[in-house]
């Protein structure tokens, strides 16, 4: 019956007396004398189902005709459904821009954007570190970064050596489990994990690969595990993670990646005039701007000059756009630690010993903490908005401080394009039909709500 309902797009009430009675009567044919279209007679009582059956059949027929009409109308109805702007700004909570006086920004993948060459660079540098320093087999040097393999938000299972994509409820997605580069079948997942749901105990063994720099890490982990598996080498999956993570950290902290990017900025950095226009507009409106990044100042300074100098007036510098610049902030520790700020000498590349009790626009500060930042600036939580791309470093920490947050989600652009496609919208419309939703229902909601990817009418 459920299948029948689905195929028709019709919802029958669960308490359908006619059908229930018929089924019960059929199953217990004796002592019941059934006359299908004209009612039936039980020993000791007469039941006239004529009127009931006629009404119900008419109702079912009407519902079927209505569902059929809706289905045939889908192509026309799709034209009436609004599409979303892939470059739009979406909100999941009301935000009054007038109330915002302070705009904070992360640097990497927020103000600065990188080409895919960066993932290749990190992958190659880490791969060489594994071979030359950690004595992995020379054959690993043959590996090549595959941009089609990793996505953001994967988890690595240090015990089993699998890369996992979990859904909102913490279950492994049906096509979201890879051992090395091989996708595991549903049966293999169940054999390995017992169930697709990852319990709390098991979650402790997972490592989150959250930001864009993790793309290279995820790909390198998978390539090494595949290589060891193919070579039938005995290995501990947790060591693979430790070593790859160590190599990735090394190429960042040693400055190898930063120096390479600054040596060839045209290859790695993406210029965008609209960033300058946006920042200048905020300044003109009297807003305070601050930069809070984990990257070292020389790297940020070099990148900002390359990306913005063409669009900023001659004789001006990107530094004039910001009221406070904080580098090497050590987010997310920044939000709950009590590290003091230290003034950074750009010329000498040294940190001053004098205590910091004010944050001046023409200075650069290192380290620090949110507590100290709020004490010095006196900026109140709700008047601050912070832009970033990292769930923990840029969104969760600031949100706890009462700041408003803006997430830069690169994947959203492609997701929205997919959701705007004819085939996706057609399937969505059929689903909505089956949920009892109609296109007309969308008209009840304001346009801006409809545009939110998080919004679905109930
Ligand atoms: Mg970032």
Image: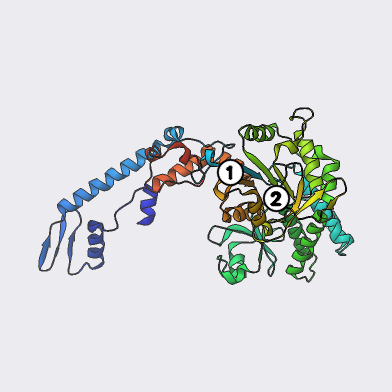
Closer to us: 220 or 24: 220
Residue beneath disc 2:
212
Picture layout, residue 219 above or below residue 111: below
Q: Report whether 402 appears left or right of 21.
A: right
Picture layout, residue 164 above or below residue 415: below
Q: Position of residue 174 (x, y in %)?
A: 57, 58
Picture layout, residue 274 above or below residue 375: above
Classify 10 Å Cα crowding around label 2: few (below 14), some (14-19), many (20 and above): many
Q: Earlier in the sequence, mark 2 or mark 1?
A: 2
Disc 2 under 8 Å from ligand 1? The reply is yes
Q: Residue at x 36, y 53 (%)?
A: 4
Residue beneath disc 1:
415
Q: Position of residue 219 (x, y in %)?
A: 74, 55
Q: Position of residue 155 (x, y in %)?
A: 65, 60
Q: Position of residue 27 (x, y in %)?
A: 26, 66
Q: Image quadrant of residue 172?
A: bottom right
Closer to us: 2 or 142: 142
Q: Is residue 223 visible?
A: yes
Label 2 vs label 1: CA separation?
Answer: 17 Å
**Of marks 2 and 1, the one in the foreground:** 2
Determine whether label 2 and label 1 are within 8 Å by CB: no
Q: Is residue 268 visible?
A: no
Q: Report whether 50 appears left or right of 332.
A: left
Q: Residue at x 77, y 70 (%)?
A: 235
């Amino acid at each position: 019956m459920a299948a029948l309902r689905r195929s028709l797009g019709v919802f029958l009430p669960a308490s359908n007396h006619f059908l229930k009675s018929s089924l019960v009567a059929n199953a217990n044919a004796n002592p019941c004398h059934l006359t299908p279209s004209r009612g039936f007679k039980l020993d000791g009582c007469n039941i006239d189902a004529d009127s009931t059956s006629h009404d119900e059949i008419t109702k079912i027929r009407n519902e079927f005709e209505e569902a059929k009409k809706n289905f045939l109308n889908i192509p026309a109805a799709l034209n009436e459904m609004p599409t979303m702007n892939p470059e739009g700004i979406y909100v999941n909570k009301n935000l009054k821009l007038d109330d915002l006086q302070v705009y904070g920004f992360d640097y990497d993948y927020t103000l600065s954007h990188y080409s895919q060459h960066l993932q290749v660079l990190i992958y190659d540098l880490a791969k060489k570190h594994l071979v030359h320093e950690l004595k992995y087999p020379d054959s690993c040097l043959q590996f090549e970064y595959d941009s089609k393999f990793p996505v953001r938000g994967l988890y690595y299972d240090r015990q089993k050596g699998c890369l996992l994509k979990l859904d909102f409820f913490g279950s492994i997605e049906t096509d979201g489990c890879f051992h090395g580069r091989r996708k595991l079948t549903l049966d293999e997942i169940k054999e390995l994990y017992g169930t697709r749901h990852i319990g709390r105990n098991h979650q402790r063994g997972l490592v989150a690969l959250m930001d864009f720099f993790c793309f290279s890490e995820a790909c390198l982990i998978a390539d090494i595990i595949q290589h060891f598996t193919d070579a039938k080498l005995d290995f501990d999956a947790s060591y693979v993670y430790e070593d790859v993570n160590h190599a990735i950290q090394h190429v960042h902290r040693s400055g190898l990646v930063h120096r390479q990017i600054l040596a060839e900025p045209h290859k790695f950095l993406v210029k965008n005039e609209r960033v300058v226009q946006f920042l200048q507009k905020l300044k003109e409106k009297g807003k305070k701007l601050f930069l809070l990044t984990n990257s070292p100042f020389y790297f940020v300074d070099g990148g900002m000059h390359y990306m913005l100098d063409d669009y900023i007036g001659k004789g001006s510098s990107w530094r004039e756009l910001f009221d406070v610049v904080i580098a090497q902030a050590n987010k997310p520790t920044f939000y709950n630690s009590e590290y003091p700020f230290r003034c950074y000498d750009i010329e000498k590349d040294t940190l001053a010993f004098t205590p910091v009790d004010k944050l001046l626009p023409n200075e650069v500060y290192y380290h620090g903490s949110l507590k100290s930042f709020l004490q010095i600036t006196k900026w109140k939580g709700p008047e601050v908005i912070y832009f970033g791309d990292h769930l923990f470093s840029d969104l969760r920490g600031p949100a706890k401080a009462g700041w408003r947050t803006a997430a830069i989600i690169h994947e959203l652009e492609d997701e929205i394009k997919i959701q705007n496609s004819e085939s996706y919208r057609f399937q969505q419309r059929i689903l909505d039909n089956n949920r009892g939703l109609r296109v007309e229902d969308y008209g009840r909601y304001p346009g801006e709500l409809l545009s939110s990817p998080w919004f679905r009418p109930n």
